[in-house]
Image (cartoon, rainbow, N blue to C red):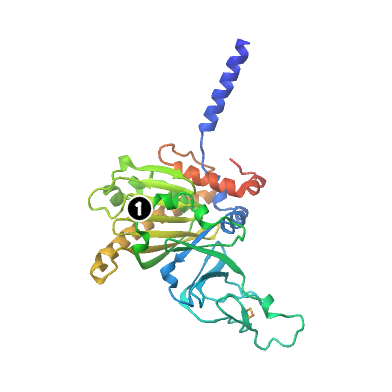
């Protein structure tokens, strides 16, 4: 009896040790085509995506055309001032309707064969299509996607049955409720492309462990000994006390599955982490300031450049890691309980989202 009990105790102690061991995602998940395809379906086709700022599309006909993980879409303000969003796919023979970027149009005309749509998505003209009794214009409008805005930021979701945006944002609204986000003016958007998987960059964003090694000037303006990483619902929260001379507010946020938000005394920035394929990622950074006047321009430009320098430091190291993730030597690495709780949380969410598809891949760890 005594022997059995101690065996049970030994077993549970061994289990506790096993449970406490935390390794990151397998290297293959950072470059395998099958994993990327599963992520497209299970993550990017189903979760709310930060698309743009409401101020990017102020008036009727203003649009932003962009993409995520190969899904091209655009957000447009219709003639009544309402936000609408569509897949950027012509229902005739699949051409894109709008080039990527920001612009204005009243009617959308497909360049391929000239079909014309209004901003409510209706097919208005199919020029020279010919007589066809079976063809009805009302059956061939644009494919709409869900769009909602939150405090000046516009999000879309390709999944019709997805929960509302407010629910998907999890702990974000509560975390930033005291910050006057709407009072900031967007002054610039900066894009970066890097040769790494979107998770390689995300892993980097959700930990401060690398700050002493990779960002020496950033390290100088924060009290790194008090850097903390926690996670809440759909959110990783990083905080650190600021020293004088810091442009930051001391709080950096990452939201599931791929946006970031940092608020500081003079404004904020947000970014979209956009997968281009399994080994390439685009970052789209938007910078907002409380004072967007000419008088503040020099200071604002300096803040933007400081941020961009840090991003460039990050993607340099991410590209180095990506090379090794693809080379076949590294399998997976141990995650620090002190610094990499955000990485662990992100990986758990990815595993959960991929679910059965990940198990089929036989890479569940
Ligand atoms: S593909 Fe758009 S009109 Fe033919
Ligand atoms: Fe960094």
Q: Is residue 238 above or below residue 308?
A: above
Residue under the point 48% across and 74% down: 81
Q: Quadrant of the C terminus?
A: top right
Residue under the point 43% across and 59% down: 271
- Where is residue 79 drawn, in percent x and y? 51, 78
When asked about the image quadrant of residue 348, the answer is top right
User: Which residue bears the numbered disc 1?
Assistant: 178
Residue under the point 48% across and 51% down: 200
Q: Is residue 229 above or below residue 169?
A: above
Decide if residue 89 is in sight here: yes
Q: Say which of 313 and 138 sits in front.
A: 138
Whether residue 8 sits left or right of residue 262 in the image: it is right
Decide if residue 257 is in sight here: no
When asked about the image quadrant of residue 95, the answer is bottom right
Residue under the point 39% across and 66% down: 190
- Where is residue 164 drawn, in percent x and y? 54, 57
Instruction: Give the structural element (helix, strand or loop) at label 1.
Output: loop
Q: Say which of 62 and 242 sits in front.
A: 62
- Where is residue 127 drawn, in percent x and y? 65, 87
Mark 1 residue crowding within 10 angstroms, few (<14) / some (14–19) / many (20+):
few
Q: Quadrant of the N terminus?
A: top right
Residue extending furthest toward the front: 80
């Amino acid at each position: 009896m005594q022997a059995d009990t101690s065996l049970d105790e030994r077993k549970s102690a061994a289990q506790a040790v096993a449970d406490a061991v935390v390794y990151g995602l397998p290297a293959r998940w950072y470059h395998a085509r099958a994993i990327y395809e599963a992520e497209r379906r299970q993550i990017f086709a189903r979760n709310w995506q930060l698309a743009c700022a409401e101020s990017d599309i102020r008036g009727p006909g203003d649009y932003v055309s962009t993409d995520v993980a190969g899904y091209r879409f655009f957000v447009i303000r219709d003639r009544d001032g309402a936000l609408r969003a569509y897949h950027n796919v012509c229902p005739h023979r699949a051409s894109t309707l709008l080039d990527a970027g920001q612009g204005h149009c009243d009617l959308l005309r497909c360049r391929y064969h000239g079909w014309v749509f209004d901003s409510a998505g209706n097919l208005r003209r199919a020029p020279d299509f010919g007589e066809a009794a079976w063809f009805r214009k009302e059956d061939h409008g644009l494919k709409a996607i869900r769009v909602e805005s939150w405090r000046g930021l516009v999000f879309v979701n390709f999944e019709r049955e997805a929960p509302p945006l407010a629910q998907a944002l999890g702990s974000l609204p509560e975390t930033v409720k005291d910050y006057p986000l709407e009072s900031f003016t967007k002054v610039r958007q900066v894009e970066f492309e890097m040769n790494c998987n979107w998770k390689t960059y995300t892993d980097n964003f959700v930990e401060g462990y690398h700050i002493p090694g990779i960002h020496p000037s950033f390290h100088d303006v924060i009290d790194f000994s008090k850097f903390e990483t926690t996670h809440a619902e759909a959110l990783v929260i990083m905080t650190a006390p600021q020293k004088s001379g810091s442009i930051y507010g001391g709080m950096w946020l990452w939201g599931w599955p791929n946006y970031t938000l940092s608020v500081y005394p003079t404004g904020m920035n947000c970014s979209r982490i956009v997968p281009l394929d399994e080994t390439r990622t685009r970052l789209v950074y938007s910078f907002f300031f409380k004072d967007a006047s000419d008088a503040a321009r020099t200071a604002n430009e300096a803040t933007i450049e400081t941020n961009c320098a840090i991003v460039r430091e990050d993607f340099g190291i991410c590209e180095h890691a990506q090379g090794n993730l693809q080379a076949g030597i590294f399998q997976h690495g141990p995650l620090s309980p002190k610094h990499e709780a955000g990485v662990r949380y992100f990986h758990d969410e990815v595993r959960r989202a991929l679910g059965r598809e990940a198990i089929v891949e036989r890479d569940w760890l």
